Image: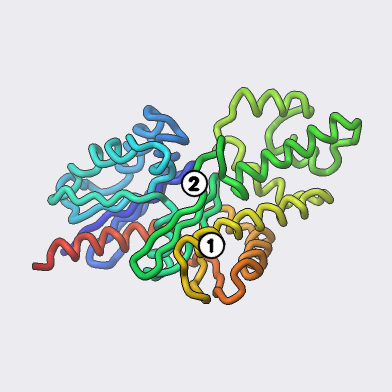
Amino acid sequence: MTRVLGLDIGASTTRARLVADGEVVAEARAASASMTAAGPDRAAAALTDLLAQLPELTGSLDAVCVGAAGVITAPDTRDFLRCRLAPLTSSGRVVIVDDASLVLPAAGLTDGIAVICGTGSMAVGCWRGRTAVAGGWGYLLGDEGSGYWVVRTAVRELLTRLDGDVPPGALGGCLLAAAGATDLTQLRSAFYRQPQPWHWARHAPAVLDCADAAVAGIVRQAAQELAELAAQVATRLAAADGVPVILGGGLMGHQGLLAATVTAVVTALPASPVRALAEPPVAGAVRLATAAATAADQP
């Protein structure tokens, strides 16, 4: 029997899937175990919580694969994860990749471009043995088009209205209600007082669903930013026309943003088929873990 564990560690949540001989045995969900998003203490607590929800694992697994947000910007993430997960295996096989790298295998592809849009954003691609990345720099330096970016852009729009003595409008009502703020001054203070991206990205659906004239522009710009990530990866890969593009991440569940992003990617890469990821990214972690276990069994 082959037993593998897949983990998808995003900036907001962590998901696990335990599989034995191709059958899902158990699943679990916990807070983010990302070192960059949650910090070492909260990440460790989240990982402990997640593993406690699964059947006894110590030494019983053939391989583990983890896709973790922040693995590129926080090198100590690899040691943090390997130290805690290797004892669960009989072989020490722990595959660690960034969370965006789960999208293509979750879609059943080895070659293509994956764009992930959740709390943060980035694109990764594989083509004929080559790999390329665009974005993934974190909220201080990048994450264009992400959930955090959407909310920050909305806050900036509201502060511009405040400076110009323009009423906050529907956007103000939507975001103030979502954030639990009484006015824009309090909202601005809260943004600086608690700047963690996961704290604000959760309000992105409230912004995207808001009936305010500015929202269409925010959606269009977010979609263009995500399409640009895909185009950058395609250029760096020198990929042939028609390289498939898969859109994943929590915010791609918003139909308005998804439709706008598909349109923007088709405009940037006209020959490429574009589709949303149908399975959760954790399925990609399971497939990578299974491949690692299978490769180890071959002579």
**Residue at position x 58%, y 53% from top?**
251
Residue visible at 68% across and 34% down in the picture: 179
Q: Amino acid at mark 1?
A: Leu
Instruction: Give neighbour class at mark 2: few <14, some 14-19, many 20+ (Cα, 10 Å).
Output: many
Of the pair 174 and 28, the residue shown nearer to us: 174
Q: Quadrant of the C terminus?
A: bottom left
Residue 264 percent location from the top left of the image = 66, 64
Q: Secondary structure at mark 1?
A: strand
Quarter-wise, where is residue 108 in the image? bottom left
The structure's colour scheme is rainbow
Where does residue 222 sit, x and y in percent of width and height? 66, 52
Q: Image check: 86 left or right of 201?
A: left
Inspect the image, locate mark 2, and give the three-letter code of the amino acid beneath it.
Answer: Gly
Q: Is residue 228 above or below residue 153?
A: below
Q: Position of residue 239 (x, y in %)?
A: 46, 70
Secondary element at tag 2: loop
**Residue at x 30%, y 43% (from the top left corner):** 51
Q: Which residue is mark 1?
A: 247
Task: Please give the residue where the numbered disc 2 appears in the rendered image.
Answer: 136
